[in-house]
Image (tube, rainbow, N blue to C red):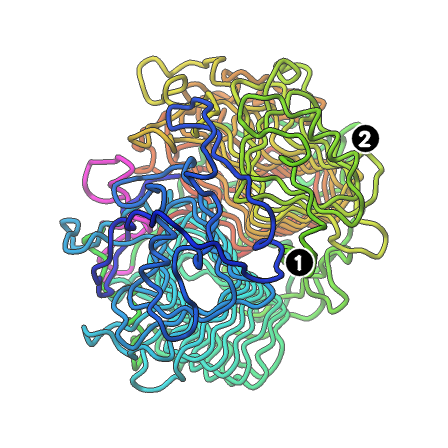
Amino acid sequence: MLRLIALLSALLLAPWPAQGAPRPESIEVRQASSYWLAQIQRQGTVAYTDDGDSRPSDPTTYKVYRNVKDYGAVGDGNADDFDAINRTMFDGGRCGMGCNSSTIQPALVYFPPGTYRISKPIVMPYYTQMVGDATSPPTIKGLSTFEGIALIDSNPYYPGISNPDGTGINWYRNQNNFFRQVRNFKIDLTDMLEVNPDGVSGPAGLHWQVAQATSLQNIVFQMKPKSGTNKQQGIYMENGSGGFMSDLVFNGGAIGMAVGNQQFTTRNLAFNGCQTAILIGWDWLWTFKSLKIDDADIGIDMGNLLNGNNQSVGSVIMFDGAITNSAVGIKTSHNATSFPPTGGTLTVQNVDFSGTQNAIVGANGVDQILAGGAKVDLFVQGDAYVPPSDASGPARAQQLPKRLAQADPAVSDCDDTPMSTIRPIPGSATVAPADATISLGSPPESSDTSPSSISPDGVSPSSISSDAVSPSSVPPNGVSPSSISLNSTSPSGTASNDTSPLAASNGTCTRQSVAAQPTKLQQQWNKVQMSQPLLNSDGSVFERSKPQYENEPVSAFVSVKSSGAKGDGTTDDSDAIQQIFNSATADQIIYFDHGAYLITKTIQVPKNIRITGEIWPLIMVSGPTFSDVNNPQPAFRVGNPGDSGAVEITDIMFETRGPTPGAIMMEWNVADPDGQQGASGMWDTHFRVGGSAGTQLQVDQCRGSTPDSKNFNSECYGSFLMIHITQQATAYLENTWFWVADHELDKDGEDKLNIFNGRGVLIESQGPVWLYGTSSEHHVLYNYQISNAKDVFMGFVQTETAYMQSKPNSLTSGFQPNSAYSDPDFSDCRGDDCKKTWGLRILDSSNVYLMGGGLYSFFEDYEQTCLETEDCQLNMIDIQCSNEVYLFGLTTKASVNMVNVNGQPAAIGSDHRNGFGQTLALFHQA
């Protein structure tokens, strides 16, 4: 990930052990509960060493699974269990202080039912899953003498040292703090102090400073009731590059969540009786799905201003939720003169404000932007591109300057329409208000453009107030805003949902596409009638939590190691795994013990099966079957075309071992049976190519950013395509990361890598498809492509262009465009900045809904000079011959053109500057 400077930490840092004490010579093994996870035989091993050799660990000496009671924890609600839990966490010399990352020291730490009192933070080393008993979640409860940043800490600060600007220094680089889970807990602060000894900040339940492949699930945060003195908070997150959370409850406290992050997806969060439910100090984009807030003074506070002028919150989306019985729903500092122009972009869709007098107010907490008391179908605040039919009447806000002509409405042949390669001539420059002292849309004044010199929201770290995201930073009386004019009249009518095809089979557009017009909005807008197959019966978008099988007996689980697979990183386990799958019955769950399972041929996954793993066991694709770039083969084929069934995959890691340019890592064919919406899906399952032990795609072979790395190297081939969701399939994906490693995880130095992976996510489904909290990064041709598809929901997606481009570029990186996969051919490009990874392509498709997208381009061959002019690449999103495409909360970074429609630029980045990138509240291609 892009390596950015840590934003800040104003919390009191209390001392804690850097490493756990050696585990005792004798550990008492205790029975936990009937939960299968506590009962199953433990055979997990680590297959590789840090030098990539296959040398499986001895399960009697390095324990992948550990039970805190086996290390002396009592859990009786009286004893201080800190020391025992700390031993559990660090047993085996795991990746803690002084270790940037490691995939070869994983730990699944299980907490049986009970109440675990602690006096210091539980520190999570890298690659840790903290799992409480799902049948009776345990409680982590702070003692009245507790000292530290939070009860659970995902990224400690080094005590007593800081950066020159005063910000703290963490153990792990926050943007690279991957691979963590916490689930099934009650986190109790009710016996702790209301205010830390510094007299400013309050204690937190969880310090969650994380990046991709992380998740929180099924957690209750219990705080003291809100009051004039209580400063407790549930979650404190000052920065990172996340991430996903679901099924959380926050009771009481000053702040439910005080957060700042590049991007995040949250689903099904409930806040009860919090003073401020959610305080956002900064972000690039945050998507809230099914957020329920009740009895809050402020529901969401996104009004933070740096130096009293500049908005630090980039964009927020809230949909299918409620803020009820509260004084203020959402507080924002966005207005007609605020800076940066698209800072504070906000979309609110299908949200109930019953019992809340003020749905949306200005930064002073008084000026009403939108009245409460009712459900809001759609409110849009920010820059938008909409067809003329979307709204009418005096409520329409001001028109933005139109800097380039839109595409001709009648495109004769989309396949032959050239993409524009001419840079737009800027019109009138966006100018900061006279009193704005910092341009958030500009890089730091220093000429240093190394990754470490760029701060998360594009400003010099020294210019950020030390209390921008501090738990103590909720102002008692708000901050003084500029006056916001009221404009909340809803246009009449409903947005069009015409799903007639735009393109015939020969690629010719048979219906005129309507050019979207640029508009600036701060008002209610036409309700979007989303496609019915994507919705629940109540009209909200369908969602489904990760299954944990808490009601299944241990006898239902079939261990692959007990059934013949080795998982040692060298044995070909293809036949063993296929036999296990073939023999599985509907009442069984296939369990992959931790290890590395080589597969050298296509594995046929039955159409009805449940698969889960022990802290991301590796399924590694390798061998001659997957070596021909011109004859790609699926490695993991889920069902056959036309199959309907229920497939569930959780907590698995898919990798490659050595070059596999002919591998389609997963081909997803299965469709939900009639009447079983969302029956098939993947949760907390990730695709990782290179950069880790055993992949043979590490710095030894594929070091990047060197004089010798400017050209393609066939020894550094990744896969052909990570996942292909085929035409007849349906799919539900949640917290799934499709990552081509840009840096080393297991060798010292986090060195840069050049790995050439053809494509990320290809969706050709006729729907429905749901993507929640997915990311696809660093692929050669595109990160996401939706082709000849319909009924696709994405909320939120994140992409990054391959860092080494354009040396080599998309066409000189070992993958030639393949028309069978509707690949981009870049045939019209005049310069290398055009021949770079497409973030998102939507071709010949309809009913596509993006609820939050962060599509970033940070480099030109690992150099960041292009950030100074925001032109690291020419194009980012390609929409061709498609209709009813809704892009809500879209942020791009350093792409000249944000959106192209039918071969022409439709939204220009320089028109929509935000603090970090360029942002649109809505782009609707009718």
Please say if the residues under marks 1 and 2 sit with CB atoms less than 8 Å apart: no
Q: What's the distance in space between the residues labelled 1 and 2, CA to CA?
A: 35 Å
Q: What secondary structure is the stretch in magenta mostly built from?
A: loop
* Span shown in magenta: 433-460
**Res. 260 image quadrant:** bottom left
* Residue type of the residue flagged with mark 1: Arg
| Upstream in sequence: badge 1 or badge 2 | 2
* Residue type of the residue flagged with mark 2: Ser
Observer able to see residue 905: no
Q: Residue at x 37, y 16 (%)?
A: 709
**Res. 32 image quadrant:** bottom right
Asked if residue 290 lies left or right of residue 764, the reply is left
Instruction: Describe the element under mark 1 as helix, strand or loop.
Output: loop
Residue 534 in the image, given as x and y percentages of width and height: 73, 56
Residue 841 in the image, given as x and y percentages of width and height: 61, 36
Examine the structure image and report whether residue 423 is included in the region drawn in magenta. no
Which disc, if any, is residue 505?
2
Examine the structure image and report whether residue 444 is included in the region drawn in magenta. yes
Between residue 758 and residue 613, name the one nearer to us. 613
Residue 90 in the image, given as x and y percentages of width and height: 34, 48
Which disc, if any, is residue 544?
1
Q: Residue at x 57, y 30 (%)?
A: 567
Residue 412 in the image, given as x and y percentages of width and height: 73, 31
